[in-house]
Image: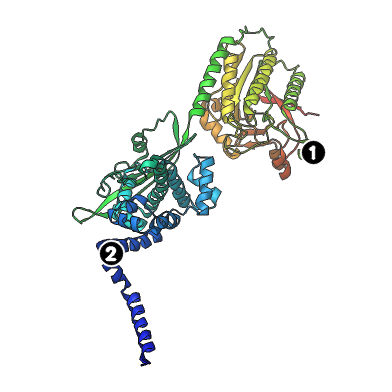
C-alpha cells in the first residue's frame, strides 16, 4: 500500500530539525558538555571583547583550568589561539609599529619627538609605540602604576584604557601607554616561554607568576626615567613632588653631570573611587616633565682648558720688559675686527676666496701696513682689541654659539690652535713697538672660544712686563687713556642709540673727567653692511660711535642677500687730550 503522505511528513520533520538546531543549538551544546561548555561559551564571548580592544594575555587564557578541557578535545583551539588571537591582538602586521620597531632597533636612544618626526605622527602616538617596543624587548615594567594596570588586565581582560584610567584615577593617555607596554610584553613572555620550555615537558602545566595587589588610587607616585647617550627625560606623576628642585632630588639627578634644558609643570584635581569604601576622593595631582642634557662634554672641555692653561703657565717664556723710546703720550689702537678665522668662501660663488691661509696673510699684511703708516707717531702704548668674532664658529661644532651652521674650512680644534698662535705672534710684534694692552671682546659667533682664547693669551704672556690681557667676562669693555674714554663692544646686543647713555651710567667717573670730543664707542659685527646704510661714524648724545670695518668677505648666504662692501682694517691714534686725531686705513688688494 502506498503512503502519499510520507514525503510531506519528511519535509515537515526536516524543518523542525533545522529549527531546533538553529535556535536550540546553544542549549543543546551546553547540555552536552555541561559546566565546561558554559565556560567555553563565556570564553568565546570574552574573546570577542578582547579582539575589540586588540589586547591579549596568553597566560590569562591558556592558564585557565576550565579551558584546558577544550584544549584536549578540540584540536582547532590551539591553532585558533596561536593564530587568530595573536594576529588580532598583537597586530604584528601593523606597518606603523613595524616601522617604529626598525627605527628603534637602529637607534635605541631615539626620543619620542624624533620618532614622531620620522614616522609623521604626533608625540603621544610615538610614545605608545616606543613603550610597546620596550615591552617587546624588556618585558614588564616595575613602575607601580604599570603593575596596577597589569593586575587589572589579568582580572578584567575586556577593560580598555578609559575603564582602567577611571578605576585607577590616572589619565587615559597614561593608561594607553601602560597598555602599549603590556601588549609588547606579551610577545616578550611568549619568546621567553619558548626558550624556557624543554622538549620533555612541553605538556607540563605552568602557573602564571603572581602579580602585585592593586593599590588604592594615588597610593604611590610614578616616575619614568629614560636615559640616552647625551640626554635624559624625566616624567613624574604623583602627589609627593611639586617642584623642579624636588624632582631632581627625588630622581637622584647628579647636577654636575646633567643640566636642565627645559621643563613643564602641570597640576590638576582628580577624583577616584576608594576600592574599600566606595567613597569618591579628590586630591591634587602633579605632572612634572624635565628634559636634561649631559654636561660631560662641557666638563671635559673645561678640565682640558684648565690643564692647558697650567701647561702654558709652566712653558710660557720669560719676557723682560723692553725699553721703549719715549713717545708723545698718545695711544695707537690697532683694530682688526671680525676676522672669522676658519671661514670658507668660494670665489666663484661669493666673489672672493677666503680660507684660514688667506685670512692669516690678510691679517699679517694689515698689521704690518698699519704699523708702517703709524711709524712716525711714537705712541706711548698700543691698544689691541681682539675677539669680536675672531673665530667663525664656536668650540663644539661648525656652528655659531647660537647653533647656526656655518661654512667652515677646518674643525674647531685646528682653528683654535692656529688662531691663538696667530694672535700671539701679532702681540709679540706689537710689543716690539710699544707696551701692549690686549682687550678681549665677545662676539656673537665665538663666545666660548673667545673666552678660552683670552685665557690662553693671558697665561702665555703672564711673565711679560709689557703685555697685559683683559679677559673679563663683561660684554662691554672700557679703556681710559689720560682724558680719553673708549667703549668696546661687538655691537650685536645693544642699540647704537643707547650706547651714549650706557657709557655715562656704567663709567660715570671717567665720563665726568673726559671731554665730549674724547668719548667714543668702537663696534664691529656689521662688517661693511652698516656703512652701506648709515654713516660709518655717528654721533649719539655726545659720544662718537664708529663701526669698524672688516677684512672678511661675505660668505655664500651674505653674498646671496647682497651684503658686502669694501674690506678694510683701521688704526686710530688717540691724543691724550683731544681724542682720535688720526685714522689709518689698510685695504687688501
* Image spot of residue 131 (x, y percent): 43, 46
The label shown at residue 191 is none
Q: Quadrant of the C terminus?
A: top right
User: Toward which corner of the image does residue 257 lie, by quadrant?
Assistant: top left
Q: Is residue 578 left or right of residue 172?
A: right
Q: Is residue 441 left or right of residue 583?
A: left
At horizontal 57% and vertical 15% (from top left) the residue drawn is: 459
The label shown at residue 33 is 2
Would you name the residue on which mark 1 appears?
A: 348
99 and 571: which is toward the camera = 99
Nearer-N-terminus badge (2/1): 2
Q: Quadrant of the N terminus?
A: bottom left
Callout 1: SS: helix
User: Most extreme residue toward the right, as rendered?
Assistant: 589
588 and 323: which is toward the camera = 588
Badge 2: how crowded within 10 Å, few (<14), some, or many (20+)?
A: few
- Colouring scheme applied when the structure was drawn: rainbow
Q: Is residue 312 above or below residue 127?
A: above
* Image spot of residue 200 (x, y percent): 37, 41
Amino acid at each position: 500500500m502506498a503512503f502519499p503522505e510520507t514525503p510531506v511528513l519528511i519535509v515537515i520533520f526536516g524543518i523542525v530539525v533545522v529549527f531546533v538546531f538553529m535556535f536550540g543549538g546553544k542549549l543543546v551544546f551546553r547540555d552536552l558538555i555541561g559546566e565546561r561548555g558554559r565556560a567555553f561559551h563565556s570564553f568565546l564571548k570574552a574573546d570577542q571583547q578582547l579582539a575589540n580592544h586588540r589586547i591579549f594575555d596568553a597566560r590569562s587564557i591558556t592558564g585557565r583550568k576550565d579551558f584546558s578541557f577544550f584544549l584536549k578535545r578540540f584540536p582547532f583551539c590551539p591553532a585558533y589561539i596561536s593564530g587568530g588571537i595573536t594576529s588580532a591582538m598583537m597586530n604584528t602586521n601593523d606597518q606603523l609599529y613595524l616601522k617604529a620597531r626598525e627605527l628603534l632597533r637602529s637607534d635605541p636612544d631615539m626620543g619620542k619627538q624624533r620618532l614622531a618626526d620620522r614616522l609623521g605622527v604626533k608625540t603621544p602616538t610615538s610614545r605608545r609605540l616606543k613603550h610597546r617596543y620596550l615591552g617587546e624587548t624588556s618585558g614588564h615594567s616595575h613602575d607601580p602604576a604599570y603593575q596596577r594596570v597589569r593586575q587589572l588586565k589579568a582580572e578584567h581582560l575586556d577593560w580598555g584604557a578609559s575603564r582602567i584610567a577611571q578605576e585607577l584615577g590616572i589619565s587615559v593617555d597614561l593608561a594607553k601607554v601602560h597598555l602599549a607596554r603590556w601588549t609588547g610584553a606579551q610577545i616578550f613572555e611568549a619568546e621567553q616561554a619558548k626558550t624556557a620550555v624543554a622538549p620533555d615537558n612541553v605538556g607540563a602545566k605552568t602557573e602564571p607568576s603572581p602579580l602585585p595587589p592593586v593599590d588604592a588610587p594615588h597610593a604611590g607616585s610614578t616616575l619614568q626615567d629614560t636615559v640616552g647617550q647625551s640626554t635624559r627625560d624625566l616624567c613624574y606623576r604623583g602627589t609627593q613632588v611639586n617642584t623642579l628642585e624636588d624632582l631632581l632630588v627625588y630622581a637622584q639627578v647628579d647636577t654636575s653631570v646633567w643640566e636642565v634644558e627645559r621643563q613643564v609643570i602641570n597640576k590638576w584635581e582628580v577624583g577616584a573611587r576608594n576600592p574599600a569604601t566606595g567613597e569618591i576622593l579628590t586630591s591634587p595631582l602633579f605632572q612634572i616633565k624635565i628634559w636634561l642634557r649631559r654636561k660631560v662634554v662641557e666638563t671635559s672641555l673645561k678640565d682640558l682648558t684648565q690643564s692647558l692653561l697650567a701647561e702654558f703657565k709652566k712653558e710660557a717664556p720669560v719676557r723682560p720688559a723692553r725699553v721703549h723710546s719715549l713717545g708723545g703720550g698718545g695711544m695707537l689702537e690697532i683694530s682688526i675686527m671680525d676676522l672669522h678665522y676658519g671661514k670658507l668662501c668660494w670665489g666663484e660663488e661669493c666673489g672672493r676666496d677666503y680660507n684660514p691661509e688667506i685670512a692669516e696673510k690678510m691679517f699679517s699684511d694689515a698689521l704690518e701696513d698699519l704699523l708702517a703708516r703709524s711709524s712716525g707717531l711714537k705712541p706711548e702704548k698700543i691698544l689691541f682689541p681682539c675677539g669680536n668674532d675672531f673665530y667663525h664658529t664656536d668650540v663644539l661644532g661648525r656652528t655659531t654659539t647660537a647653533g647656526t651652521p656655518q661654512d667652515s674650512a677646518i674643525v674647531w680644534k685646528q682653528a683654535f690652535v692656529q688662531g691663538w698662535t696667530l694672535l700671539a705672534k701679532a702681540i709679540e710684534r706689537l710689543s716690539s713697538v710699544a707696551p701692549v694692552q690686549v682687550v678681549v671682546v665677545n662676539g656673537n659667533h665665538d663666545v666660548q672660544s673667545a673666552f678660552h682664547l683670552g685665557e690662553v693669551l693671558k697665561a702665555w704672556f703672564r711673565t711679560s712686563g709689557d703685555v697685559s690681557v683683559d679677559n673679563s667676562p663683561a660684554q662691554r669693555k672700557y679703556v681710559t687713556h689720560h682724558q680719553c674714554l673708549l667703549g668696546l663692544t661687538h655691537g650685536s646686543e645693544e642699540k647704537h642709540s643707547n650706547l651714549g647713555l650706557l657709557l655715562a651710567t656704567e663709567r660715570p667717573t671717567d665720563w665726568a673727567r673726559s671731554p665730549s670730543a674724547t668719548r667714543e664707542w668702537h663696534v664691529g659685527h656689521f662688517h661693511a653692511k652698516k656703512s652701506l646704510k648709515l654713516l660709518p661714524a655717528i654721533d649719539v648724545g655726545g659720544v662718537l660711535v664708529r663701526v669698524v670695518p672688516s677684512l672678511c668677505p661675505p660668505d655664500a648666504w651674505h653674498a646671496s642677500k647682497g651684503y658686502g662692501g669694501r674690506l678694510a682694517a683701521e688704526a686710530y691714534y688717540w691724543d691724550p687730550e683731544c681724542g682720535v686725531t688720526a685714522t689709518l686705513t689698510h685695504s687688501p688688494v
